[in-house]
Image (tube, rainbow, N blue to C red):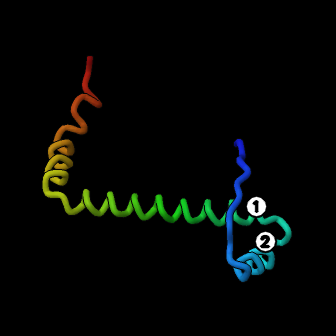
Amino acid sequence: MSKQKIAITLDDNLVIFLDQQAGGNRSEYLNNLIKEERKKFIQAQLKESLTEELESASYQQEIKDWDGVVGDGINGER
């Protein structure tokens, strides 16, 4: 995966904390931190989408309609 070098501005106390936590590799620490935040964000979006589907009467009806035909032709002879 390609990488980009960026410049950011942090409060002094945050830089001290970053250095304490990063173990000498700020980039790796920040990469891991952002990956975790992205993962949490995606999971929250997925949960929200699934909740919307569960609460949607039209979606639930569509699922029931498909359940009625899902096995059609699977064991049929040719």
Q: Amino acid at mark 2?
A: Ala
User: Could you tell me the amino acid type at mark 1?
Assistant: Glu
Q: Position of residue 69 (x, y in %)?
A: 19, 38
Secondary structure under tag 1 reads: helix
Residue topped by disc 1: 28
> Looking at the picture, does residue 68 appear above or below residue 58?
above
Residue 38 appears left or right of 71: right
Residue 7 image offset from top left, x and y in percent: 71, 58
Q: Residue at x 76, y 61 (%)?
A: 28
Q: Is residue 74 above or below residue 28?
A: above
Q: Secondary structure at mark 2?
A: helix
Residue drawn 82% across and 65% down?
25
The single residue placed furthest to the bottom in the displayed view is 13
CB contact under 8 Å: marks 2 and 1: yes
Label 2: which residue? 22
Q: Who's the residue at 25% across and 57% down the image?
A: 53
Image spot of residue 1 (x, y percent): 70, 42
